[in-house]
Every structure is written in structure tokens, then in C-alpha cells.
Amino acid sequence: MFNNYSNKKLVIVFAALLLIVVVMFIFDSNPNESTFKKNIVDINKSDVTSISIYPGVNNHKEVKLFKVGNKWKVTLNNNKTADVPQEKIDGLLRVLTQIKPKRVAAKEPIKWKEFQVDTSGTQVKVFEDGDLVLDIVIGKYVFKQPRSLSSFVRLSDEEEVYEVNGILSITFNHKP
């Protein structure tokens, strides 16, 4: 009699757990979907035709790099243009394509100022044949022990702030 009573309890507990699992699968529309992006920059370096940088140290005035034929040029403050070495462009694009998130640092706009990915950050726009393919805001950097340098970035059309490796402001936040 004691075993029969225990078996009934086990069957009831098992049925309740099974019901909970079934309900979770029904209401969790895509359990494999993750909110963490493993890759936030997806550009083809050879297709890039212009880059607009709005560095904070330059009062967010546009620094426009554009391709004319096989050469890169920059628009100067006096509306004249100057040549830009291909190595500089390759370096900029390499830094952008190497951006890989380590973690999500914030999910709400109220935190943007703390990470300097609001209007105080450096905005970088990348174009392919006039089409905007990347619009990213580069914020502050931090130094964590041992020897870990990180920056905070946000895609302009998203709310999430990501921590990424490296000090991106060295590359993008300076006067032309």
C-alpha cells in the first residue's frame, strides 16, 4: 500500500513537470534565439566607397573619406581634398571588421551617457555605393586588470551597448 501511494505521487509530480515543460516550449517561440550578437560589424572591405567619421574632439564635424577610382581622399575644412594613403584606410577598415562583442554592457538608452555612446561618442558611418552599411557609435574606453583594454560601442539603430576589445577612440576620435 505504501508503494502504491508513492507511485501515484511520482506520477502526479512527473505529469506536472511534463506539463510545465510543454507550456514553456509553446510560449518560448524560438529557444535557440540569442539576444547577444557574436558579430556586430558586417562589411565587405573591398566594397566600401566612403567613410564618414564624426569625432568628438572635432566637435562632431564630419571627416569624409571617399574613394575616387582606386584612390582615397579626405575632405578638408576648407572644402579642398587631400589624398589618403591606402594603408590608413586599410587600418580603419581592419579595426572596424575586428570589432567583436565581449558582452552586452547595457540594454537601455538611459545608460548611453555612462558609456559615452550617446551624442558625446564618435559616430562612424560606412557606405558601399552610397548605401549605409554600418552606423556605429564609439564610446569611452576602460582599462581593466590584467592588461585588458576595452571600448564601448553601440549600433546607431539599436539600444544595446557592447563592450569590445581595444581602444577604438585612438583610431577614430582625432582631428583630420
Image (spheres, rainbow, N blue to C red):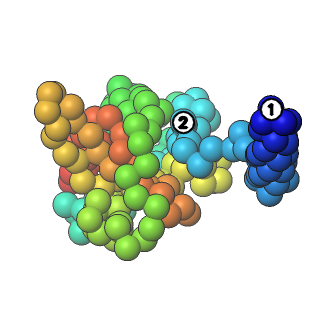
The reply to whether residue 119 is visible in this rendering is: yes
- Is disc 1 in contact with disc 2, using a CB cutoff of under 8 Å? no
Residue drawn at x 43%, y 49% is 104
> Which label number is shown at residue 42?
none
Residue drawn at x 26%, y 40% is 150
Residue at image mark 1: 3
Residue at image mark 2: 38
For the residue pair 37 and 46, the one nearer the viewer reads as: 37
Q: Which residue is situated farthest in the front direction here?
A: 1
How packed mark 2 is, by other alpha carbons closer than 10 Å (few <14, some 14-19, many 20 or more), is few
Q: Is residue 35 above or below residue 122?
A: above
Task: Describe residue 154's horizontal placement relative to residue 27 as left or right.
Answer: left
Indicate the position of residue 68 as horizontal and vertical percent values: 52, 41
Q: Is residue 119 above or below residue 41?
A: below
Q: Disc 1 marks which amino acid?
A: Asn
Q: Which quadrant of the figure has residue 61?
A: bottom left
Distance CA(mark 1)–CA(mark 2): 52 Å
Q: Secondary structure at mark 1?
A: helix
